[in-house]
Image (cartoon, helix red, strand yellow):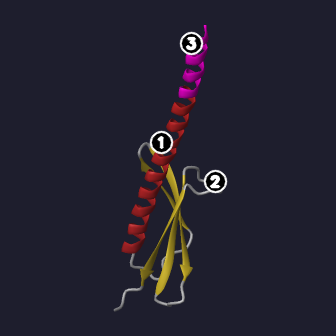
Amino acid sequence: MLAMAVFAVAGVALLGVADNNYRHISHLEEQMFANWVASNQLVEASLDKTWPPKNNRKGKVEMAGRTWYWQQKVVKTANKEMRAVTMEIRLDEDEELVTTSVTTYLAQDKP
């Protein structure tokens, strides 16, 4: 009887650990895909030749069977020929919190 109680407690603890592990893996997967989406959108922004980059551009993209919503934010820097571009990624268009945010700096092309 005592052995069954010990195994029952151990089984419940093992199920808790497995559930916790699954949630963490799901979160890491979501972060990884969100970072890929942000990186892809920053590459597209760097290939766009308009200056300065457009602020608050929005869009959506499909990746890994999900729809990801992105928003581009552009901030002036101390150097007039550079801009900080931040790409915010969300899983829900109306969500206030971002899944991930990646920033890069773009320089103005010299003629």
Question: What residue span does the magenta drawing correspond to?
Answer: 1-14
Residue 31 in the magenta stretch? The answer is no
Q: Is residue 79 above or below residue 96?
A: below
Q: Position of residue 93 (x, y in %)?
A: 59, 53
Dot 1 or dot 2: first in sequence order is 1
Q: Position of residue 24 (x, y in %)?
A: 52, 42
Image point (57%, 69%), residue name: 56
The quadrant in which residue 65 appears is: top left
Q: Indicate the amino acid at tag 3.
A: Ala
Q: Residues within 10 Å of mark 2 (few under 14, many from 20)?
A: few
Q: Indicate the amino acid at tag 1.
A: Ile
Disc 1 or disc 3, which is closer to the eye? 3
Q: CA distance from mark 1 to mark 3?
A: 33 Å
Image point (45%, 82%), residue name: 51
Circles 1 and 2: CB distance less than 8 Å?
Answer: no
**Closest to the observer: 11 or 104?**
11
Q: Position of residue 102 (x, y in %)?
A: 49, 65
Q: CA distance from mark 2 to mark 3?
A: 52 Å
According to the image, label 3 marks what residue?
Answer: 3
According to the image, label 1 marks what residue?
Answer: 25
The quadrant in which residue 16 appears is: top right
Image point (41%, 86%), residue name: 108
For the residue labelled by badge 2, is the local secondary structure a helix, a strand or a loop?
A: loop
Instruction: Count all numbered tags in the image, as a single digit.
Output: 3
Q: Which mark is residue 94?
A: 2
Q: Is residue 47 above or below residue 100?
A: below
**Closest to the observer: 24 or 94?**
24
Residue 106: tell me if it is visible: yes
Q: Quadrant of the C terminus?
A: bottom left
**Prevailing SS of the magenta stretch:** helix
Disc 1 or disc 2, which is closer to the eye? 1
Q: Indicate the amino acid at tag 2.
A: Asp
